[in-house]
Image (spheres, rainbow, N blue to C red):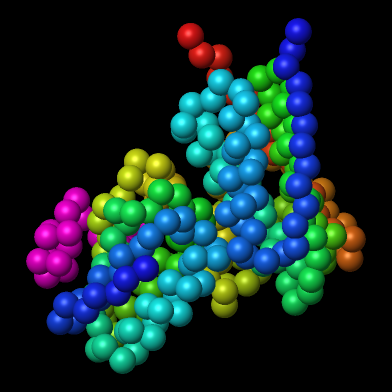
Amino acid sequence: MRFSNDMSIQFPNKSANEGFARVAAAAFVAQLDVTVEELSDVKTAVSEAVTNAIVHGYENMKGYITVACRIEGDLVEIKVSDSGHGIPDVEKARQPLYTSRPELERSGMGFTVMETFMDEVDVVSALGVGTTVIMKKRISEKD
Amino acid sequence: MKLEKLGEQLIVRLEGELDHHYATRVREAVDAAVLVGDIRKIIFDFTEVGFMDSSGIGAIMGRYRLMRTVGGTVGAFGISPRVDKLIAMSGIKKIITIYTTEKEATRGIS
């Protein structure tokens, strides 16, 4: 039988929660037979998505971020959602080195990092409603 | 984080996870030190950094811009393979110098 499990955490958009969110997601994924490198990839991708929600999603406002993780067999799916401003142009936002907030020293690499460290990244966003980033990663078979 | 001034060099000893939360503090502390210390080279010690995301890259790029305004440079040493994965994909090796040891970094090369 395929192993399946899921979890969800919710927290306010405080930057102190970035560390909590990525460690919680990595600890959940560690139920699978993962390498240290795969865990680190997940941690980094979650950190990018949660930081985006804090810096851009909830710019100048308060709100909650949800990180939902699901394991189906060897597939890990992580959804990071906010109910913030939404992204006006998702395609532009995903371009390497593009940032809407250079004054905050954003490197513009967030989505590029997510795409590099995960197998699949989808972004669903609606202005005034919020943004959900859905990331998938297949965990490699171990000997 | 600990800051050490060595002549015109500022050694920034980072500790823990260099994310957006920590990067904000690093930026404030380093910029204040540069302002009062007449610094021409910022050297980041990554020995105790176990995690970094793109916010760390942004912070380094920001300090590079700051140094450029005074004709200074930025360097780093003690980078683990995990942190290097991100540094390599960011392209910042074109603007900052990565050293293998602290001695090399402080010896005054570039």
Question: Image point 51% across, 14% down: which residue?
Answer: A142
The residue segment tinted magenta is B92-110
Please determine whether, in this image, residue B15 is positioned above or below residue A36: below
Indicate the position of residue B88 as horizontal and vertical percent values: 38, 47
The residue positioned farthest toward the bottom in the image shown: B36
Question: Image point 57% across, 74% down: which residue?
Answer: A104
Residue A18 painted magenta: no
Question: Image point 62% across, 52% down: which residue?
Answer: A20
- Horizontal side, residue B83 vs residue B75: left or right: right
Indicate the position of residue A102 as horizontal and vertical percent values: 57, 73
Give whichever of A8, A41 is nearer the camera.
A8
**Quadrant position of the C terminus of chain B in the picture:** bottom left
Q: Is residue A104 visible?
A: yes
Please determine whether, in this image, residue A2 is positioned above or below residue B23: above
**Quadrant position of the N terminus of chain B in the picture:** bottom left
Question: Image point 69% across, 33% down: which residue?
Answer: A136
Q: Can residue A48 be seen in this view?
A: no
Say which quarter of the image contains residue B108.
bottom left
Count of picture labels: 0
Say which quarter of the image contains residue A7.
top right
Give whichever of A58, A71 is nearer the camera.
A71
- Horizontal side, residue A77 vs residue A39: left or right: right
Residue B99 painted magenta: yes
